[in-house]
Amino acid sequence: MSEQEIKVPDLGGADEVEIIEITVSAGDTVEAEDPILTIESDKASVELPSPGAGKITRITVKVGDKVKEGDVVGMMEPSDDAGGSDDSGDDEAEEKSEAKAEEKDEAKPEDKSEESKPAQKKAGGGSRKETVKVPALDGFDNVPVIEINVSEGDTIEVDDPLVMVESDKATMEIPSPYAGKVGKVLVSEGDKLSEGDKLLEMTVEEDGSSEEEASEDSGQEAKEDKEQKAKPQPDAEREPKQSESAPEPQGATYEPPSPGAKVHAGPAVRKLARELGADLTRVKGSGPKSRITKDDIHAYVKSQLKQAQQGGGVATGSGIPGVKLPDFSQFGETKREAMSRMMFATANNMQRSWLNVPHVTQFEDADITDMEDFRKAQKAAGEKKGVKMTPLPFLLKACATALAELPQFNVSLDMERKEVVRKQYIHIGIAVDTPNGLMVPVIRDVDKKGLWELAAESAELAQKARDKQLKPAEMQGACFTITSLGGIGGTAFTPIVNTPEVAILGVSKAAMKPVWDGKEFQPRLMLPLSLSYDHRAVNGADAARFTSVLSQLLGDIRTLLL
Ligand code: COA
């Protein structure tokens, strides 16, 4: 079965060009002129076409390599050859075994250029001992080892991570320059490494296809290439690779990684994980020693997508890399405890809202001096009724009036259907701080209720929230939320909109302030209001109108009756 070289054609005068994409892999069947790879000069990107129809047997270059006219980029079996004999039953078994060989090939590092070089001729078994040393660390030295990825007896491939080191700028993986068996590991976690330090001993198989032999045989070029490979790689699991130009959709399936989790995966699997934005520390490996396979990555991504579609997954933030956790134990003692379901749900809701909603917060102070006089005057009446009148019912009533006056705040956006949902009712949620976390019971038809009714209902719902007695229906259907920290303190804050609502009112602690009345400063009790809103639904002018309406209503509560 004769193989044909795939060579770089005339490059129209360009000297050396860079390979930016490889579109086929070993085992692929191609037609004449099908693109094999894409090369890019400083002027243009060009596809290198297949010289004929047939099957690709190997690709001997990798993305980033520079090539010039006449360079061999791969080998193929022309289809005449492959199908020329009359066993045109097409020897399925052969195809299968080749497909297998390809898979094996893929599991190894992509850069197999050395394999196609004269090194191939050097067959024969035997093994030799090598001491792996620390390569150049991008200008760093004395870099602490934070993780050791191999142990004595492990069989590893070229480029498999040996140890992870962390400078104050980056986490880097030191990959293996050889394939073979790991002997004695000469470093421990916490050791500080510099270029040339001994890392570990290895038994390298001399089977003619090892990277080491290839480098010996193909001289300086391969040596440089090997050095390049042995260069520490920014850790794919902790830091997106600098060289990858497209943003990685990591946030799409983000889950907090398990710190300190060791990952066993070959370079091809790591590359796939990077491409799909899968965090390898979250993927369960099904291979020997929990090694992660490509199938594991596919299964993980599939399950994450499914979860996200069902709304049960972790909040998404397309294109936004997840927050990577360091191993905190390196800084001191830590304890881990499971999040409560409520904490997890709240965290997800907050993140979903924060990532999906363009937030703006409008601030305003309302003069509640008279309102407070009136409220305090109700103390005796409240005691009779068994209800405490706090500022909250006034806020509820004022917000209901403002929502009726500015109905653009009483909406939800249906971006999928490109529709605005206008609500014809006014239900308001109140954020309640409970020992178990934040809960938001909802008061229905606030516009139709009086202050005493609102005072009684909000106190009852707040108590139910603290006693974990709220029914799901009592926490649904809000058009707007009030979050009052006034009983605690603070001068202002920027609350997060409780999606799919489009606005939330934050209330801070009222304080006496000197207010200019045109002639002199008057001591007035001022209530700080912070209105966060979804800027897709509400414009800034309307937000200023909303807080100004609130301020007028609270400043003169008689207007609440109008
Ligand atoms: N400025 C000054 N004092 C205020 C005030 C304000 N804005 N709001 C309330 N107060 C006073 C009340 O008048 C009361 O004082 P008093 O006992 O002297 O009359 C005291 O603070 C406590 O009020 P509180 O019991 O908190 O009642 P409330 O009706 O104001 O609030 C809840 C009820 C449920 C909203 C409140 O208890 C709560 O949980 N707030 C926290 C909400 C939260 O955590 N939000 C954060 C979301 S991120």
Image (tube, helix red, strand yellow):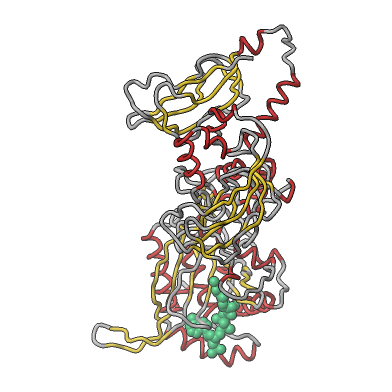
Q: Considering only vertical position in the picture, is 41 above or below 440?
A: above
Residue 378 visible in rendering:
no
Residue 345 quadrant: bottom right
Which residue is painted at 74% across and 16% down in the image?
Answer: 91
Q: Farthest left residue?
A: 519
Residue 15 quadrant: top left
Q: Is residue 511 left or right of residue 57?
A: left
Q: Position of residue 249 (x, y in %)?
A: 53, 47
Q: Is residue 200 left or right of residue 169?
A: right
Which residue is painted at 60% across and 86% down in the image?
Answer: 388
Which residue is painted at 58% across and 26% down in the image?
Answer: 58
Q: Considering only vertical position in the picture, is 60 above or below 312?
A: above
**Is 211 in front, or is 267?**
211
Residue 123 quadrant: top right
**Is 359 in front, or is 386?**
359
Q: Position of residue 323 (x, y in %)?
A: 54, 59
**Is 209 in front, or is 402?**
209
Which residue is painted at 28% across and 83% down in the image?
Answer: 516
Q: Is residue 196 left or right of residue 299?
A: left
Ligand 1 appears in which quadrant? bottom right
Residue 400 visible in rendering:
yes
Q: Position of residue 389 (x, y in %)?
A: 57, 84
